[in-house]
Structures are given as C-alpha cells and as structure tokens.
Image (cartoon, rainbow, N blue to C red):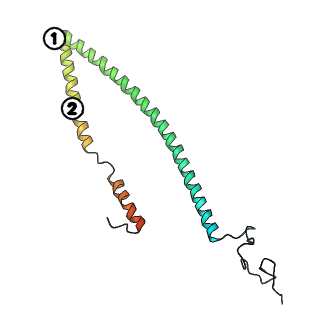
Amino acid sequence: MTQVHPDPGGRPSGAHAAPGFGTDSGPDPDLGQPLSSVGDIISDISQNLSTLVRQETELAKAELRDSATRAGKGAGLLGGAGVAGHFVLLFLSIALWWAIGGAIGHSWSALIVAAIWAVIAAALAAVGRSKLKEVKGMPKTTSTAKKIPDALKGHEETR
C-alpha cells in the first residue's frame, strides 16, 4: 500500500493524490498555472469582455468609415448626374422654346415652356409631400428601446 505524504504546499503526494486538492495558490497540474480565486476569474472575464467590446467597437468604426467613404463617393456621383440631367433639361427646354417660337412667335414661347415646367414642379411637389407624410420614423425601435429599462429590472412585459 502506498502512503500519502503532504508536500510543503499542503498537497498530498503519492499514487492516491487527488488533483486540485489543497490550497488555491499552487500550480494547476493540468495547466501549469496557479489556480485562480473567484475574484481573479471575474477580473479575467471583465478584462476579456472589455477587450471584446473594444475590438467590436473598432471593427464597427472601421466598417462605418468604409461605408461612409463609399456612400460619399456614390452621393457625389449622383450629384454630378443630377447636374448633368439639369443641363439636359435646360437644353431640351431651350430647343422646345425655339420650336414653339418658330410656330407661334418667340414672345410667347418662353412663357409656354415655363408654364409646362411649373405644372411638372407642382405635380412633383404634391407627390413628394404625400410620400413624406407616409414616413413613420422608427416605431419598432422606439417601442423596443422603451422596454429596455423594464427588461433590466426583470419586468420586460409591463408595457
């Protein structure tokens, strides 16, 4: 029969020694590292969580920067297309002005073209206004954001 003799750290030695028996300050036989107290474990979890949040925040910032750069380039190109389209409409309007002017006289042709554009502008404004009235904002986000304080208290279904 093998005898169990405690080592100077308070751990038993010999064939029947149980892993993890004794104090928490000695090395962990499986990992070769000292065993941690609950406070050390919570501290490690807190540090790891903090690092994870920091890394996720940096990733989100990088993605936002990339998206904003691409959106800015796209918006600039669309702005340029809008200016070019404006010139197309301008020159088509001038051509229409001259065509009408050749048929009925140049004095009234500019007013006729201006009246056509006024009707188009009024129609676009009316449609745009009705579309803006349909905008609801963020009803689902607002609803769920209002539930967060109650959920933290454990009463998520009170609203």
Q: Nearer the viewer, residue 73 or 151?
A: 151
Q: Nearer the viewer, mark 2 or mark 1?
A: 2
Query: Quadrant of the rendered structure where residue 89 is?
Result: top left
- SS of the residue at dot 2? helix
Q: Position of residue 1 (x, y in %)?
A: 83, 90
* 123 vs 88: above or below: below
The first of marks 2 and 1 along the sequence is: 1
Query: Quadrant of the rendered structure where residue 151 is?
Result: bottom left
Q: Nearer the viewer, residue 134 or 47?
A: 47
Structural distance between the alpha carbons of marks 2 and 1: 27 Å
Mark linked to residue 104: 1
Q: Nearer the viewer, residue 116 or 71?
A: 71
Q: Nearer the viewer, residue 153 or 140?
A: 153
- SS of the residue at dot 1? helix
Q: Is residue 21 left or right of residue 1?
A: left
Q: Residues within 10 Å of mark 2 (few under 14, many from 20)?
A: few
Q: Answer whether labels 2 and 1 touch (C-beta < 8 Å).
A: no
* 77 vs 58: above or below: above
Residue position marked by numbered label 2 in the rendering: 123
Q: Position of residue 115 (x, y in %)?
A: 18, 22
* 157 vs 16: above or below: above
* 147 vs 91: above or below: below
Q: Residues within 10 Å of mark 1 (few under 14, many from 20)?
A: few
Q: Callout 2, which amino acid?
A: Ala
Residue displayed at 47% across by 38% down: 68
Q: Callout 1, which amino acid?
A: Ile
Residue displayed at 20% across by 30% down: 122
